[in-house]
Image: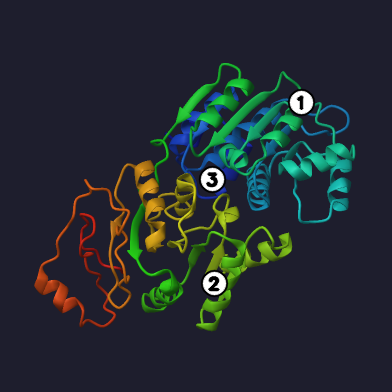
Amino acid sequence: MTFHHLGLATDLLRAVAEQGYSEPTPIQQQAIPAILQGQDILASAQTGTGKTAGFTLPLLQRLKTTPFQGHRAPRALILTPTRELAAQVSDSVKLYGKYLPLRSAAIYGGVGIVPQIQTLRRGVDILVATPGRLLDHLQQKTLDLSHVEILVLDECDRMLDMGFIHDIRKILAVLPSSRQTLMFSATFSKPIQQLAHTLLKSPTLIEVAPRNTAAEQVTQIMHPVDRDRKQELLAYMISFHNWRQVLVFTRTKHGANRLAEKLTKDGLKTAAIHGNKTQAARTRALNDFKQGKVRVLVATDVASRGLDIDHLPYVVNFDLPNVPEDYVHRIGRTGRAGNEGKAVSLVCRDEYPLLKSIERLLNRTIAETVISGYEPTASLQSDVEPPNRKQSQQPRSNRANSQTQAKPTRSKAKSGGRDRKRLHTA
């Protein structure tokens, strides 16, 4: 199947072809025809599967066939959880709609509101927004949403996780009830299903990947290590294996800043991105990372969604997330669009319960290797290992030999750990 089979207009097919795409992804194959037919949809797809184009292309076509009348008030509203995702979705709208007489704009916090007001006064057809800044405009009466025909909730599970449900309900209250609603989520959690039940009318359900699973193109591995040696091990891996582009996740903003400073002192060009950074600083750090000016980008979970980085080869969980689903979102930054990627987790003893929760969510065991010279002083399983957990035994001779090795390129199976294959760290 090609994009020509999906019923898209010539102007849209031209824009798609210029990006080098000829065959739609599974989410696009299912979502585009349903949206063109005016159906509400609830779609679940892993990041990097092309879902943005999956709703952008048919949205553009539907607006194209019904030209605006009078003042240009938004006829399509796309809500996203973060500034970065709003900017990227807006870029996609402009990219695919470049040959259409439609105007689009993005409004989000962290930047001045006056230029946004001026843009809205000139009129837009498609508005991409974060909930908080959208409410600011509604309160200042600088925005009219009474003409919205299509509502898109992108990464709606993340918006719920971030506490936007009340903001979303306030926004929904001023939208026309006759609209078409499209919900996109990485997971079909119960809250998402409950929200869908209240918003969608006879929706088409689209699910192109197993629930709560990580991309198949991502190789996952974990390294047991003491907490106070994580930074040293991370710097060693990046330097030894000559990783040129690494996205590292920490649990806190302070931790992100501290790690970025230490890696910079180790000679690794590093930047941090999190909620306390201004939008200008976040945009600059992300652009420098994409362009190769920055080798390591340290981020909190504010960046686990919506970061569109082509061919990102490595994601590192410096801290495991408290919410298992966030692990899936984090590692979804790599292995996108059919490319291979590697997700590395540095796990200390007190994070073992978090690891167990992630493995239960994935319904799989994440491969473990211990890097010689960075062996943890205590087993991950100490005091928390379930009694029925299988124990693997490393031959005594191998254990003895491993103690004398320097930092090698190969890792060894963990003594007294879980049944895991011996894997190379490269």
> Callout 3, which amino acid?
Ala
Q: Is residue 220 above or below residue 138?
A: below
On the image, numbered disc 1 is attached to which residue?
173
In the image shown, does 180 or 385 lie closer to the viewer? 385
Mark closer to the chain start, 3 or 2: 3
Which numbered mark, 3 or 2, is in the foreground of this view?
2
Q: Residue drawn 40% across and 50% down?
A: 338
> Callout 2, which amino acid?
Leu
User: Would residue 73 appear left or right of 167 to someone viewing this image?
Assistant: right
Q: Quadrant of residue 274?
A: bottom right
Q: Where residue 239 appears, x then y in whole percent?
A: 41, 78
Q: Residue drawn 34% across and 65% down?
A: 224
User: Would residue 75 appear left or right of 406 to someone viewing this image?
Assistant: right
Q: How far apart are the alpha carbons under marks 3 and 2?
A: 42 Å
Residue 101 tag number? none
Q: Residue drawn 41% across and 51% down?
A: 354
